[in-house]
């Protein structure tokens, strides 16, 4: 299936044309049929001469319903642009084409209606020229294999050049040109890019209702991906399950984009009686594949009058613009435009207000009124609802560059960030250049796929920009060496201290950065072979000499200080295995505990502390903690409150 939306000025015959092509009534509301004015989105479908099935989203043309028009056009890849032969190009024709340009729609077919009432050539030439200048003239394949000859439209002034919009003159009342229009629609859809059936689902809801016995049903245009009965999707972050599917009024077990689809949902927070139904602009999405965000950095592409009447520096007062405006500047000299600080952003079927902050160049930050599921590369349309309806209210397209933008509190940070974003593209490598480090879940939610993430994770589920990762390795080496110089008595830099120094979010990343000649040992980054600094080693040797004759007469703190063994030096010697710490302030030579146990075995068992003190030729200050150490080591055991025995 293919989906095409209509576009064009009010009362130029869009609904009449859809009705003539499909035999279906696109106007669903009684008021619409009574007034002859499309108010809401309408839906109809047909089979083209090639056998392909085509659905239409019929949009209103009145200026008051621009937001509804954008909801219909937003998710579709192509448009049928309608201009009346007896009126030609009109104000809403202009606003609609500017909207299509901003949204990035590049595939268009022009239908000049009411060809039975006026010569279609002038209107056709005027409309084709404007549509082509807006970039809507997608290249078309040859007619061969599509079930018919290309119609001879050169007599109407719309022939042939590559990049020109194909045009057909028709009359919905008499049927003139309808067969040629159907063949042209075949060529239009044949030129559309093939949607990715494996893409994550994002179905922007354009209608919701409740069916007795079935519950909530939502409809929308599925641009790519696939939905199947039984799938679990997310609606505003809440899980819902697909109970049933329909496409073009036909039940289906699975629907693949592009398609019009109705989805019957089951979920614990969904209403069953029509109250509190999901609003237009909500989205059904594949869980974990989209980033819900209300803050995005975007690249502005001015369109319509904003682009054509770019304002110079004199149009604004200072860097923030005049009044409530902000300045956006292009690359060329004098390329500057003013944007209101408060705009309405459109994507898919949603419209949300947003605040605009300029960062530098064409990059601005948008704070959206509510979080939306977005990917890098999504295009938003920016509209000024405060402008007079006689003016074009669509101002710009906005390509999403970052869906998780950083805080910018430091002076100059905004301009530096904008400079990095100017060359950004919607892929994993670009996302990593901007964010440097990302978990696989966050990276996947930014770009929508986990199959094209580059060289693989640097550790665990962490991905890193290669240049930044190499820089981190150099910084870690410098940091560890500096720590070793400043802390010579420690065996190495603690991993947590290194994580903090490098500003990393996970200790795993520090461990993954350790390279020879550095090693990891007991949670530290070791920068040198095990051993003691020379002054400490000499102090230990002097202590060894003093303990040689009386191995259990541990020196007091004052004597240790005289030897040059403060608490840090003693700790280093203990870690190096050069001293034995029996208790706080009590140090002996390594093996002294085993030797003490051998001497105590010669005593009558059990023995007292006093007997042990005399046998070991030491003081009670040393004997008590030494015996407790022997208890903990399993060399002795308490018999009662007074006695111990050797094991």
Image (tube, rainbow, N blue to C red):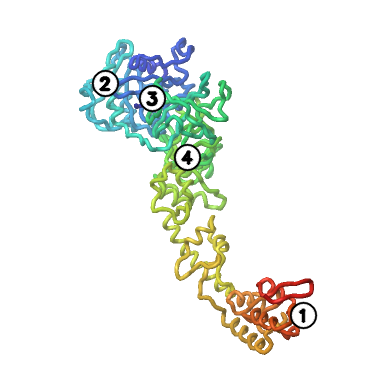
- Report the residue that reaches farthest toward the bottom: 549
> Would you say the residues marked 3 and 1 are in contact, meaning their CB atoms lie under 8 Å apart?
no
Cβ atoms at labels 2 and 4 below 8 Å apart: no
Question: Which residue in the protein does label 3 denote?
Answer: 5
Is there a contact, CB below 8 Å, between mark 2 and mark 3?
no
**Mark 4 or mark 1: which comes first in sequence?**
4
Reading the image, the residue beneath label 2 is: 49
Mark 1 Cα within 10 Å, few/some/many (few <14, many 20+)? Answer: some
CA distance separating discs 3 and 4: 26 Å
Query: What is the C-alpha distance between the residues marked 2 and 4?
Result: 38 Å
- State the CA–CA distance, disc 3 to disc 1: 96 Å
Left or right, residue 221 beside residue 606: left
Badge nearest the viewer, 2 or 3: 2
Kindly identify which residue carries mark 1. 620
Q: Which of the pair 93/213 is nearer the observer?
A: 213
**How much space separates mark 4 and mark 1, taking CA atoms?**
70 Å
Q: Is residue 342 visible?
A: no
Q: Nearer the viewer, residue 241 or 300?
A: 241
Q: Residues within 10 Å of mark 3 (few under 14, many from 20)?
A: many
Task: Identify the disc placed on residue 258.
Answer: none
Secondary structure at badge 2 equals loop
Label 4, on which residue? 290
The residue mark sitting in front, 3 or 1, is 1
In space, the residues marked 2 and 1 are separated at their CA atoms by 107 Å
User: Where 537 sits versus 56, above or below?
Assistant: below
Q: Nearer the viewer, residue 621 or 137?
A: 621
């Amino acid at each position: 299936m293919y989906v095409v939306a209509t576009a064009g000025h009010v009362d130029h015959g869009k609904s009449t044309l859809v009705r003539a092509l499909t035999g279906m009534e696109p106007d669903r509301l009684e008021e619409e049929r009574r007034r002859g004015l499309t108010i809401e989105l309408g839906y109809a479908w047909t089979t083209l001469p090639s056998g392909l099935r085509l659905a239409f989203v019929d949009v209103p043309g009145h200026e008051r319903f621009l937001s509804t028009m954008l909801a219909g056009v937003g998710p579709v890849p192509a448009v049928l642009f309608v201009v009346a032969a007896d009126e030609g190009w009109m104000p809403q024709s202009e606003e609609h084409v500017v909207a299509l340009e901003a949204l990035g729609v590049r595939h268009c077919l022009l239908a000049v209606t009411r060809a039975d009432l006026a010569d279609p050539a002038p209107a056709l030439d005027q409309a084709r020229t404007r549509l082509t200048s807006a970039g809507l003239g997608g290249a078309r394949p040859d007619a061969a294999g599509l079930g018919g000859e290309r119609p001879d439209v050169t007599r109407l002034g719309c022939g042939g050049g590559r990049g020109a919009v194909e045009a057909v003159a028709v009359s919905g009342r008499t049927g003139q040109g309808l067969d040629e229009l159907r063949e042209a629609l075949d060529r239009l859809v044949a030129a559309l890019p093939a949607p990715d059936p494996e893409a994550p689902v994002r179905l922007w809801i354009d209608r919701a209702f409740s069916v007795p016995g079935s519950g909530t049903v939502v409809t929308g245009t599925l641009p790519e991906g696939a939905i199947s009965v039984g799938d679990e999707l997310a609606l505003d972050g809440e899980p819902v399950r697909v109970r049933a599917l329909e496409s073009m009024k036909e039940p289906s077990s699975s629907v693949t984009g592009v398609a019009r689809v109705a989805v019957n949902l089951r979920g614990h927070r969904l209403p069953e009686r029509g109250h509190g139904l999901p609003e237009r602009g909500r989205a059904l999405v594949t869980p974990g594949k989209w980033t819900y965000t209300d803050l995005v950095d975007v690249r502005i592409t001015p369109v319509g009058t904003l682009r054509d009447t770019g304002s110079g520096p004199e149009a604004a007062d200072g860097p923030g613009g005049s009044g409530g405006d902000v300045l956006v500047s292009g690359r060329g000299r004098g390329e500057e435009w003013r944007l209101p600080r408060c705009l309405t952003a459109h994507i898919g079927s949603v419209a949300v207000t947003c605040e605009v902050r300029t960062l530098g160049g064409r990059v601005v930050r948008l704070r959206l009124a509510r979080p939306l599921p977005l990917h890098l590369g999504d295009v938003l349309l920016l509209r000024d609802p405060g402008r007079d309806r006689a003016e074009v209210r669509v101002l710009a397209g906005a390509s999403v560059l970052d869906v998780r933008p950083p805080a910018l509190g430091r002076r100059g940070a905004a301009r530096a960030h904008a400079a990095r974003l100017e060359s950004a593209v919607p892929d994993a490598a670009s996302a990593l250049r901007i964010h440097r480090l990302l978990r696989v879940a966050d990276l996947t939610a930014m770009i929508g796929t986990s199959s094209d993430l580059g060289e693989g994770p640097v550790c665990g589920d962490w991905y890193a920009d290669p240049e930044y990762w190499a820089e981190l390795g150099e910084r870690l080496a410098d940091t560890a060496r500096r720590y070793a110089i400043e802390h010579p008595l420690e065996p190495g830099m603690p991993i947590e201290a290194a994580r903090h120094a490098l500003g990393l979010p996970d200790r795993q990343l520090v461990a993954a950065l350790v390279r020879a000649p550095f090693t990891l040992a007991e949670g530290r980054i070791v920068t040198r072979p095990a051993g003691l600094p020379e002054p400490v080693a000499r102090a230990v040797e002097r202590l060894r000499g003093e303990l040689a004759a009386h191995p259990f007469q541990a020196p007091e703190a004052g004597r240790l200080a005289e030897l040059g063994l403060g608490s840090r030096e003693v700790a280093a010697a203990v870690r190096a295995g050069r001293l034995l710490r029996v208790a706080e302030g009590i140090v002996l030579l390594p093996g002294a505990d085993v030797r003490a146990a051998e001497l105590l075995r010669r005593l009558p068992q059990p023995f007292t502390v006093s007997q042990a003190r005399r046998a070991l030729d030491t003081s009670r200050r040393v004997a008590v903690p030494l015996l407790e150490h022997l208890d903990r080591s399993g060399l002795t055991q308490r018999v009662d409150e007074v006695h111990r025995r050797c094991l």
